[in-house]
Image (tube, helix red, strand yellow):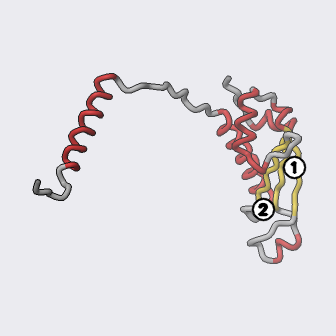
């Protein structure tokens, strides 16, 4: 289940568009479309179904119902820097989705451990019972 995705596999499934960005850049922001929006068709990547399921969870609202992952990068002032940032973020999301958590093995306390727990409860109960008001009968 080791789906290794590198940048070359993304090429066929990716669509990039540049938008006018907000934030730092001064007048440059008003003139140049520097923000990069990547749209990745996840089905075209040929991921394992389990990896795809985890990617839907990891991506959250960045994944459309049609299976398109939308990443918008506007952190930097240049198109190229934002393009690289967006592609890195896509690869990072896919890498997170490929990571499988270890299977948890259920365990039960032993009979001796249960007995010890009951004994300590009895001791504690007797200590607390001895704290009551003293009655003279």
Find the distance from the CA under tag 2 to the CA under tag 1.
15 Å
Residue 49: which numbered mark, if any?
Answer: none
In the picture, measured across the screen, residue 76 lies left or right of residue 111, that is right
Question: In the rendering, at what x and y percent does residue 20 appear?
Answer: 86, 66
Circle 1 packing at 10 Å, graded few (<14), some (14-19), many (20+), is some
Mark 1, secondary structure of its residue: strand
Question: In the rendering, at what x and y percent does residue 88 appear?
Answer: 71, 46
Q: Residue at x 27, y 39 (%)?
A: 121
Q: Residue at x 82, y 36 (%)?
A: 42
Question: In the rendering, at what x and y percent does residue 89 appear?
Answer: 71, 48
Query: Which of the pair 137/117 is nearer the observer?
Result: 137
Q: Is residue 27 above or below residue 76?
A: below
Residue where numbered disc 2 is placed: 78
* Residue positioned most to the front: 137
Q: Is residue 16 above or below residue 9?
A: below
Residue 16: which numbered mark, if any?
Answer: 1
């Amino acid at each position: 289940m080791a789906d290794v995705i590198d940048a070359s596999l993304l090429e066929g499934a990716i669509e990039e568009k540049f938008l006018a960005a907000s934030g730092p850049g001064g007048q440059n922001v008003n003139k140049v479309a520097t923000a990069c929006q990547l749209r990745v068709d996840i089905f075209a990547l040929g991921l394992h179904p389990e990896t795809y399921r985890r990617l839907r969870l990891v991506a959250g609202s960045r994944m459309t119902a049609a299976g398109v992952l939308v990443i918008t990068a506007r952190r930097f002032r240049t198109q190229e820097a934002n393009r690289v940032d967006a592609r890195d973020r896509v690869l990072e999301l896919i890498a997170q989705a490929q990571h499988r958590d270890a299977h948890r093995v259920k365990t039960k306390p032993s009979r001796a451990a249960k007995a010890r727990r009951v004994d300590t409860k009895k001791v504690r109960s007797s200590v607390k019972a001895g704290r009551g008001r003293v009655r003279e009968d």
